[in-house]
Amino acid sequence: MRRLDVPTLIRWDNVVAADDLRRRGVLLEPEESPPPTRELRGLALYTERGHEIIHEGHGSYRVPGCSGGTYTVDLAVFTDEPETCSCPDYQRHKQTCKHVYAAAIYRAKARARSRREQHQRTVSRASRGNLAPLAAAL
């Protein structure tokens, strides 16, 4: 079974968390060829309905399907097992489906947003701490 091969998607979508995915072994090195259809469909699914993806915890996500249902995606955070999805396509072919790609993009963006917010809080606290002696002198 093939691991996620989404570096081109992540580069196209300007997600900074590619290194994190590479460290986990989920992300392979970029290829010169364009991404396969499932990857493009995953990107389209994230773009159109990413706001409906729900993180259920421990690498599990509920991802909307095109036919109206939702599927459970497990990104295998704490194991070396491959990612899984409850959709018929994954169950039939045992290949990474568009729902797994959409969940991976969602997760990468959420991590990047969390890091950015943490950095902003740290900078804000540091700047308040440095200005306190000046404010006391006034």
Image (spheres, helix red, strand yellow):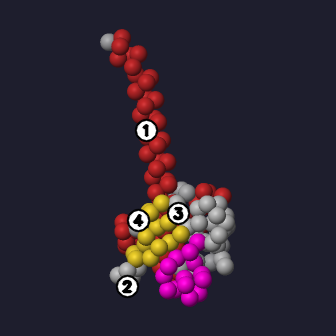
Write down the residue under mark 4.
54
Q: Which mark is residue 41?
A: none
Which amino acid, mark 4? Ile
- Residue extent of the magenta highlight: 83-96
**Left or right of 74 in this view: 132:** left
Q: Quadrant of residue 128?
A: top left
Image coordinates of residue 22 in percent, x first then y, are: 64, 61
Select label 1 or label 3 by which is in front: 3
Tell me the distance, in whole angstroms, between the alpha carbons under discs 1 and 3: 26 Å
Q: Which residue is mark 3?
A: 59
Tell me what residue is drawn at x 66 percent, y 58 percent: 23
Of pointers 4 and 2, the one earlier in the residue sequence: 4
Secondary structure of the residue carrying tag 3 is loop
N-term mark: 1 or 3:
3
83 to 134, vertically: above or below:
below
Question: In this rendering, which labeled residue sits more in front, label 4 or label 1?
Answer: 4
Mark 4–mark 2 Cα distance, whole angstroms, equals 17 Å
Identity of the residue furthest to the bottom in this view: 92
Measured from the top left, where is residue 101 in percent x and y? 52, 72
What is the spatial separation of the Cα atoms under label 4 and label 1, in whole angstroms? Answer: 25 Å
Residue 129 seen from this side: yes
Q: Could you tell me residue 56's position as x and y percent?
A: 44, 63
Determine which residue is flagged by label 1: 121
Residue 3, compared with residue 91, is above or below; it is above
Q: As shown in the figure, which amino acid type bears the numbered disc 1?
A: Arg
- The residue that appears at 43% across and 28% down in the rendered structure is 127
| Inter-mark Cα distance, 1 to 2 | 41 Å
The tag earlier along the polypeptide, 4 or 3, is 4
Of label 2 and label 3, which has the lower sequence position?
Answer: 3
Task: Report if residue 85 lies within the magenta region.
Answer: yes
Sequence-earlier tag: 4 or 1: 4
Q: Amino acid at mark 3?
A: Gly
